[in-house]
Amino acid sequence: MEDNANTREMNPEASLKVIYEMIESARSKIGRNYFYYLFWGYLVLATSLLEFFLIRIGYEKHYMVWPVLMLAGVLVTIVFYLRSAKMLTTKTFIGTSMGFLWIGWAISFTILIVFINLRHDFGLMLPMIMAMYGLAIFVAGGMVNFKPLIFGATITWIASVISYFMPYQVQLLILAGALVLSHIIPGHILRNLSKS
């Protein structure tokens, strides 16, 4: 009798069903985390456009919008994460992997920003940031098979290559456009999915 029960548990169809349910559970949790895509999408979009405006009016320290608004964004993200972590009852492999992905992205991003500032090589900053955004959202979208993120990553990589050949002011506008397609639209789709 025990052998029959174990055989049923190891059934390939049952295993596939468990895997499918895990992916759907992770997708649903990502849907509930639309906040991060929308928050960072709108924050970086606003920062890009604000710096572009400050450059146009001739403000010398236009670049200061980045450290000020990004630090504020990190603080808001930490507070939001700590509040939502209290409501989590279980951890999933995909959820944990996503956490490591974005923590690894943030560490790599910090190292990149430090090196760029030490060398004063700001022409590469935005193309590299877009390439890094593309990588993170491509992996995130691929892990749960969410095509809007994969499409957004592709657009962001293309934007990264194009922006390399453009002056800094134009790079800001390209970044803003890429964020709409890679973060804001997928974030709204995730928000709608989480409510349905």
Image: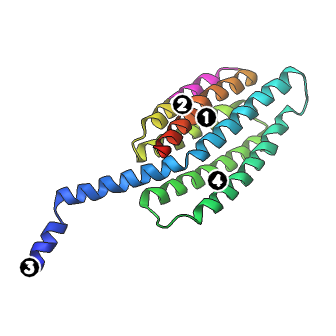
What amino acid is found at the position of numbered circle 2 in the picture?
Answer: Trp
Q: Which residue is mark 2?
A: 157
Q: Which residue is mark 4?
A: 107
Q: Residues within 10 Å of mark 1 (few under 14, many from 20)?
A: many
Indicate which disc, 3 or 4, sits on the residue closer to the N terminus: 3
Label 1 or label 3, whichever lies nearer to me, is 3
Q: How many angstroms separate mark 3 from mark 2 (CA)?
A: 56 Å
Residue 160 drawn in magenta: yes
Q: Which residue is mark 1?
A: 130
What amino acid is found at the position of numbered circle 4 in the picture?
Answer: Ile
Callouts 2 and 1 close, C-beta under 8 Å? yes
Which residue is at a point 63% across and 51% down the rendered structure image? 106
Indicate which disc, 4 or 1, sits on the residue closer to the N terminus: 4
Which residue is at a point 21% across and 59% down the rendered structure image? 14
Q: How many angstroms separate mark 3 from mark 4 (CA)?
A: 53 Å
- The residue lying toward the viewer, choosing from 53 and 88, is 88
Residue reaching furthest to the front: 196
Q: Which residues are magenta?
A: 155-166
For residue 1, the mark is: 3
Q: Which SS type dominates the magenta stretch?
A: helix
Q: Secondary structure at mark 2?
A: helix
What amino acid is found at the position of numbered circle 3 in the picture?
Answer: Met
Indicate which disc, 1 or 3, sits on the residue closer to the N terminus: 3
Tell me residue 130's x, y (percent): 61, 34
Which residue is at a point 89% across and 34% down the rendered structure image? 61
Tell me residue 154's x, y (percent): 49, 30
What amino acid is found at the position of numbered circle 1 in the picture?
Answer: Met
Left or right? Give the position of 22 relative to 3.
right
